[in-house]
């Protein structure tokens, strides 16, 4: 009898984990659709990825990010501008989307190792986004240079794909760090 109860509790926990993964994948989707028109359009998807990893941890956070990417890959319009598909994911800027996996892993691992403190969230998100920038920029240069006659330099790629997003991403990291510290006691992932 006791074994049966434990098995039910274990199954219930797995169901809760799946629900959290689905909810946070949906949060990433919604945040990728929210576009703030500044000098360049800025979405909230990087904030959602950081929030997901900070609250769900390495495994569940990365799975939620992977679900988001997989939905876009199969054609569900989950990426910014309601876009989707292989062309978006493997296009010039697709490396930034794939880089979200690295961001999630870094944030989740650092929070697990160093604890759920606001400075840990902020530093881990900053490092995670920097790795995403690096991966995405290298990807952008390779794909762009393979498909265009005029090659793009590293400085030009940074000017197009990274520099305009630094300040908005710092603001999103600050917001996500505060949200993680406030919400982590409520999210039982």
Image: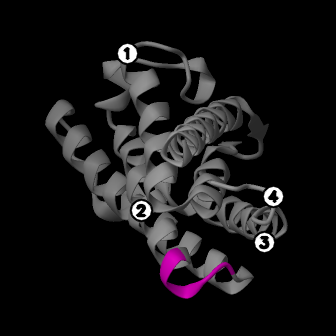
Return the residue at label 4.
186
Task: Give the percent coordinates (x, y) of residue 41.
Answer: 68, 39
| Dot 2 and dot 3 residues touching (CB under 8 Å) | no
User: Which contiguous range is marked in magenta?
Assistant: 112-116
Looking at the rendered image, the disc whose residue lies closer to the viewer, 4 or 2, is: 4
Task: Give the Cα separation between the discs numbered 3 and 1.
Answer: 34 Å
Quarter of the image where one finds residue 123: bottom right
How many numbered marks have been drawn onto this rendered protein structure? 4
Vertical position of residue 35 compared to residue 123: above or below:
above
Q: Earlier in the sequence, mark 2 or mark 3?
A: 2
> Is label 2 in a helix, a strand or a loop?
helix
> Residue at the spot x=43%, y=55% of the render?
59
User: Which SS does the magenta portion mostly show?
Assistant: helix
Residue 181: image tag: 3
Mark 4: few/some/many CA within 10 Å (<14, 14-19, 20+)? few
Which image quarter: residue 97?
top left
Marks 1 and 3: in contact by CB < 8 Å? no
Separation of residues labelled 4 and 2 (CA atoms): 22 Å
Residue 40 seen in this snapshot = no
In the displayed structure image, the side of residue 106 where residue 87 appears, left or right: left
Q: Is residue 86 inside the magenta stretch?
A: no
Location of mark 1 (residue): 74
**Secondary-structure class at tag 4:** loop
Q: Which mark is residue 105?
A: 2
């Amino acid at each position: 009898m006791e074994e049966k109860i434990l098995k039910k509790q274990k199954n219930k926990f797995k169901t809760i984990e799946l629900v959290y993964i689905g909810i946070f994948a949906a949060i990433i989707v919604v945040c990728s659709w929210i576009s703030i028109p500044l000098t360049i359009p800025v979405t909230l998807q990087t904030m959602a990825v950081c929030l997901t990893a900070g609250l769900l941890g390495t495994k569940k956070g990365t799975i939620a990010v992977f679900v988001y990417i997989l939905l876009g890959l199969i054609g569900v319009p989950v990426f910014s501008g309601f876009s989707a598909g292989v062309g978006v994911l493997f296009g010039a800027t697709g490396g930034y989307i794939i880089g979200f996996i690295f961001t999630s892993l870094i944030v989740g691992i650092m929070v697990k190792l160093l604890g759920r403190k606001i400075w840990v969230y902020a530093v881990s998100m900053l490092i995670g986004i920097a790795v995403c920038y690096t991966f995405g920029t290298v990807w952008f240069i390779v794909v762009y240079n393979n498909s265009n006659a005029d090659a793009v330099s590293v400085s030009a790629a940074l000017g197009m794909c990274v520099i305009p997003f630094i300040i908005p991403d710092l603001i999103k990291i600050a917001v996500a760090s505060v949200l993680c510290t406030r919400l982590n006691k409520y999210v039982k992932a």
